[in-house]
Amino acid sequence: MTNALFLVDSYLKESKAIVVSVKKGKYVCLDQTIFYSKGGGQPHDTGKIIKENEVYNVVYVGKFSGEISHEVDHTGLQVGDNVCCILNWERRYKLMRSHTAAHVLAALINKGTGALITGNQIEEDHVRFDFSLEKFDRALLEKYLAKANELFGTDVPVKWYELPREEAMLIPGIVKMAGALPPDIPSLRIVEIVGVDSQADGGTHVRNLDEVGNVELVKTENKGKNNRRIYFKLN
């Protein structure tokens, strides 16, 4: 199974790796990777895999049967190749900031109203969240966004670590997605925004809220009974 380096250190921009399998010439698995695979509302990473002087652009990263697969833009990589992986860091860092911002906003709305997340998607230029709020109230959503921005101007650490599943599930609010449970595995990765939120999460985040900057409301939508949607972006 691929060693997912991004789960330990989201700030790794480069790494060495060995090609362990190649399918159809362009679907490559490595012994370890810095590239995040699409999932949990967070897009896949992009970047480059370099063998000697040849560059293979990583255009998609997904997880299939427990393995992280990297789709590259042309054939040539072989099993056993020693390669260098280089992350598209500007894109990743923007997604990290957005993901942490999303956790803060979700936590504030959940604590203030009891609403759960019913859908989410992080994109390069915005974040979309759906919440199970009974009434459509744009002013209420604007209030929570303003509270989130107050936190983003403070020195609040963000940590991630593993806990035994039984212990993790005792933490109030550890799951904020409606109708969802973490995978049935012995330990869960927890992302803790100190004093603000703890969630079971497999994504990448910044180490401190002061890295997020401010976020800006793009629009809100009424998506039917008990479902409200908010779009926001980084400034």
Image: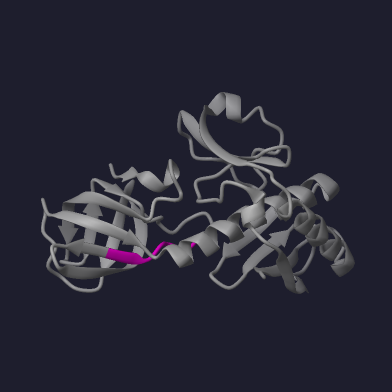
In this picture, is 65 found above or below 192? below
Magenta stretch, residue numbers: 43-48
* Residue 221 left/right relative to 80: right
* Residue 99 left/right relative to 176: left
Q: Position of residue 100 (x, y in %)?
A: 62, 53
Residue nearest the viewer, comparing 207 with 189: 207
Please indicate, yes or no, whether residue 220 appears anywhere in the rendered image.
Answer: yes
Please indicate, yes or no, whether residue 199 appears anywhere in the rendered image.
Answer: no
Q: Position of residue 176 (x, y in %)?
A: 67, 46
Which residue is at 69% across, 69% downward?
A: 232
Q: Quadrant of the N terminus?
A: top left
Q: Position of residue 79 (x, y in %)?
A: 11, 53
* Residue 224 left/right relative to 198: right
Colour scheme of this structure image?
A: one colour
In this picture, is 205 found above or below 188? below
* Residue 11 left/right relative to 62: right
Q: Quadrant of the C terminus?
A: bottom right
Which residue is at 53% across, 28% downward?
A: 163
